[in-house]
Image (spheres, grey):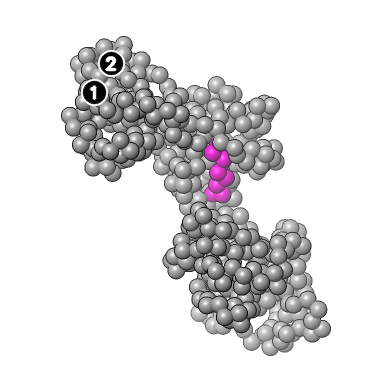
Amino acid sequence: MVGAGPGDPALITLKAVACLRQAEVIVYDYLANEKLLDFAPSEAERIYVGKKAGAHAMSQEQINSLLVDKGRNAAVVRLKGGDPFIFGRGGEEALVLEAAGIDFEIVPGITSAVAVPAYAGIPLTHRGLASSVAFVTGHEMEGKETSAIHWDRLATSVGTLVFLMGVKNLENIASQLIACGRAEETPVAVIRWGTTTEQETVTGTLGNIARVAEDAEITPPAIIVVGEVVGLRQQLNWFEKRPLFGKTIVVTRAREQASEFRSLLESRGARCLEFPTIEVVKPSSWAPLDGAIDGLEDYAWLIFTSVNGVRFFFHRLEERKKDVRSLHGLRLGAIGPKTAAALRERGLQIDLVPSEYRAEAVIDALGEEEIRGKRFLLPRAAKAREILPEKLKEMGGQVDVVVAYETVRPSSRTEEVRHLLLEGDISCITFTSSSTVENFSAMFPDENLLSLVGNTIIACIGPITAETARRYGLEVTIMPADYTIEALASEIVEYFSNE
């Protein structure tokens, strides 16, 4: 029984990750972030049993039976939001397993009762304000004639009160506390989707918080915090003050390359919507690349124009039972620091990294003397700009362009993105290559792209990509001086910080 934490997938514990990596079956809840499933083996069975208001995938009795059935023959992770033993019914499920004679262990998780107020800038205890805290259910078992909560004792004997699952009962909670002696002026915060990029916080007092939350249309899941510590949020609200908080940014990069860029944006508060417009796949035939690899001794230069080119070239080199010794005598060139880094990770020294990260700069860096009469190998995408090979040939070089990989347009969440664009809910669309622009346009064949995008900010990694975007009628607002994803992320932060 594994606690999935409060929502932010980075708050998962090391023990939880270790369990997920060994799982044969995962039974997971509504509040368990689905990104955590990526830690599990691809062949692991994934079973959703989430419950939310008016929509239960399974009843608790069915979940219990499922755990017993699967637990007899497989390594099962029961992934529960927050901590299994804090209003998670983990005790009930553990008792069922114990009665069935099935071994189990409990992996505690970071409970939302603690984490969500922290992300809202509210310490649950603070010297001079609160020296005690209580966690209270805001949603008692249906059908009970009397409440199990001793409101008369709770109202005035505890410094900070944290209610889970209580949004629908907020008015009743506030009135009970006031009736039992808590002052109407007591500060209250209601925090929805805490620790995630969708976090939303409203504050008020016991006297008006029900109306404030209703006006703000706050719905579950949410945490309610009652106490003087709520006032510290004015100084300690760190999470929602990040420069990209509240901004939805579309990342069109290929899925396998998007994680670093997404992490850079999310660390500054953005909600990133992955919308890969290209997918990198192996070429339809390895024959041209295999032929080039078998004849590497005939080349003077091996030039890579992307990390993908490096990745697929060396993958095929290994498949051919060769290694870096086959590059003996070759001079190496790389366009861009990421491409260069991919080569250095393989223990290779690079002879040419142009100061400007585009093909034209290679020509300037090499010079005519280094080109004439030399033979160049360029492993790259099936479709790419022809500037570099054409210029090399013009200056007397012999050039073999071989396909190391292909880019295709994946099936994607087109309708979701269209809806968000039309609603004006997307703040920025990022493009990291001309292909991402072209494929983005192709995903909306019946749309006027300029009308669809509207006032959404367009960010491009460099001038070639920006030129392609303008050709499709898009107005490019953000473009960094250095053509890297780090620089692009920094430029996006700078723009929205000054917006």
Front residue (pair 38, 254): 38
Q: Residue at x 40, y 19 (%)?
A: 386
Q: Residue at x 60, y 39 (%)?
A: 412
Residue located farthest toward the left when viewing the structure as drawn = 329
Q: Is residue 311 left or right of residue 158?
A: left
Residue 398 is labelled as 2
Above/below status of 293 relative to 86: above
Q: Which residues are magenta?
A: 270-277
From this view, report whether residue 116 is shown above or below residue 406: below
Residue denoted by label 1:
299
- Identity of the amino acid at label 1? Tyr
Residue 284 visible in the current orientation: yes
Residue 276 image point, x, y percent: 54, 39
Q: Earlier in the sequence, mark 2 or mark 1?
A: 1
Name the outermost residue toward the front.
Answer: 73
Would you call the spot at circle 2 few (<14 residues within 10 Å), some (14-19), or many (20 or more)? some
Judge by depth and name the residue closer to the eye, 198 or 381. Answer: 381
Q: Would residue 52 appear left or right of 72 to someone viewing this image?
A: right
**Dot 1 lies on which element?**
loop
The residue nearer to you, when weighing 317 against 248, is 317
> Which residue is rendered at x = 32% and y = 20% of the image?
400
